[in-house]
């Protein structure tokens, strides 16, 4: 009788342990090369391989959060819980931090990352094909991702982390986000809202839209650079060889250290400025307020409307 009761107790304990393990860790494999994360809060680690399958391992945090895994139209979807009103803004200003950027370049500093906040949420570890696509929709994430010969689409409420080289990327970050990424072999589209920072490597062409004090640091751009700033945002590039279009409303600025702008079209209303440390072909400037444009040299005719201040090789143009 005692032995029977002991066996029953052991069975209950085993079942209980299995239930705990099942709820804390899960894994699944899919035969595809595309993955989409939706309504996810937590840490994401993506490793790319030469294989043709996506392996997913989920490790729950201090609190259990339901995640749904499914495959639809050739895309693996990981769907989390929509954010509830938990008394904090989804882009909580507590989640600002010091970022240790690559190559000694530094964007901004702030309080350390709020590890306690993310400790409550799952860690999702993904192994996927190098030739694949990754998408995030509405996410609060710590992100670490290997290089990818495919597209990265990141439409996130908050992102902190780093991404390797990608083929093309559409990056949307909001207040508090800090992201470092590698080279982009094709097009890079950036949309920053609030105090968000992005540092990227070289790119073929770049389109930047900033609302607020966002900061974008780029490597060499071998093609078009199109920038729109509303506020005090800043866009910096080590070099541009291609056309440059700038629209600034406020005190924002665009700084390019070297290269050849063919052509430059700038419209500035406010105290913003454009600073180009190379040759500019046929600049067309519409300047209002206390705006400023500085160019190392000019090739061809300059067209100028409005007021503002213009310098060529540090000489004021009357």
Image: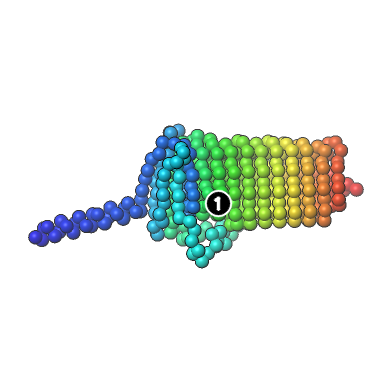
Considering only vertical position in the picture, is 176 above or below 182?
below
- Left or right of 304 in this view: 128: left
Residue 189: x and y in percent read 63, 43
- Left or right of 183 in this view: 55: left
- Which residue is at 54% across, 36% downward? 150
Considering only vertical position in the picture, is 237 above or below 39?
above
Residue 292: x and y in percent read 81, 51
Foreground: 151 or 313? 151
Foreground: 257 or 221? 221
Residue 267: x and y in percent read 78, 48
**Can residue 314 be spotted in the picture?**
no
**Residue found at the far left of this picture:** 1
**Can residue 68 be spotted in the picture?**
yes
- Left or right of 164 in this view: 122: left
- Which residue is at 61% across, 36% downward? 186
Its colouring scheme is: rainbow
Residue 69: x and y in percent read 41, 46
Q: Name the residue under label 1.
A: 156
Foreground: 123 or 297? 123
- Total marks in image: 1
Considering only vertical position in the picture, is 39 above or below 56?
below
Splitting the image into 4 quarters, where does residue 108 fall?
A: bottom right
Q: Callout 1: 10 Å neighbours few (<14), some, many (20+)? A: many
Check disc 1 and report its element: helix, strand or loop: loop
Task: Give the quadrant of the N terminus.
Answer: bottom left
- Which residue is at 56% across, 59% downward? 91
- Which residue is at 86% across, 41% downward? 302
**Residue found at the far right of this picture:** 318
- Left or right of 110 in this view: 122: left
**Residue found at the far bottom of this picture:** 87
């Amino acid at each position: 009788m005692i032995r029977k009761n002991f066996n029953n107790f052991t069975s209950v304990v085993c079942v209980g342990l299995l239930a705990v393990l099942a709820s804390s860790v899960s894994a699944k494999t899919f035969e595809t090369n595309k993955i989409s994360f939706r309504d996810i809060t937590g840490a994401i680690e993506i490793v790319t391989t030469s294989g043709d399958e996506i392996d997913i391992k989920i490790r729950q945090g201090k609190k259990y959060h339901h995640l749904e895994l499914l495959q639809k139209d050739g895309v693996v979807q990981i769907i989390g819980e929509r954010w509830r009103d938990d008394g904090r803004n989804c882009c909580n200003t507590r989640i600002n931090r010091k970022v240790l950027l690559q190559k000694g370049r530094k964007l901004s500093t702030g309080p350390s990352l709020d590890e306690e906040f993310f400790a409550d949420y799952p860690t999702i570890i993904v192994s996927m094909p190098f030739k694949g696509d990754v998408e995030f929709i509405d996410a609060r994430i710590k992100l670490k991702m290997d290089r990818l010969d495919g597209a990265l689409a990141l439409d996130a409420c908050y992102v902190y982390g780093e991404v390797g080289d990608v083929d093309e990327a559409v990056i949307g970050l909001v207040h508090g986000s800090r992201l470092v990424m590698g080279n982009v072999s094709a097009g890079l589209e950036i949309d920053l809202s609030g105090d968000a920072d992005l540092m990227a490597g070289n790119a073929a062409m770049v389109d930047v839209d900033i609302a607020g004090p966002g900061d974008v640091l780029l490597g060499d751009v071998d093609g078009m650079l199109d920038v729109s700033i509303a506020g005090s945002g800043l866009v910096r590039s080590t070099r541009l060889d291609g056309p440059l279009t700038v629209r600034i409303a406020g005190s924002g600025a665009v700084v390019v250290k070297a290269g050849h702008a063919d052509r430059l079209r700038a419209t500035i209303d406010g105290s913003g400025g454009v600073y180009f440390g190379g040759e500019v072909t046929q600049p067309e400037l519409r300047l209002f307020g206390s705006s400023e444009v500085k160019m190392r040299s000019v090739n061809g005719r300059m067209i100028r409307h409005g007021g503002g201040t213009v310098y060529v090789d540090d000489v004021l143009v009357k």
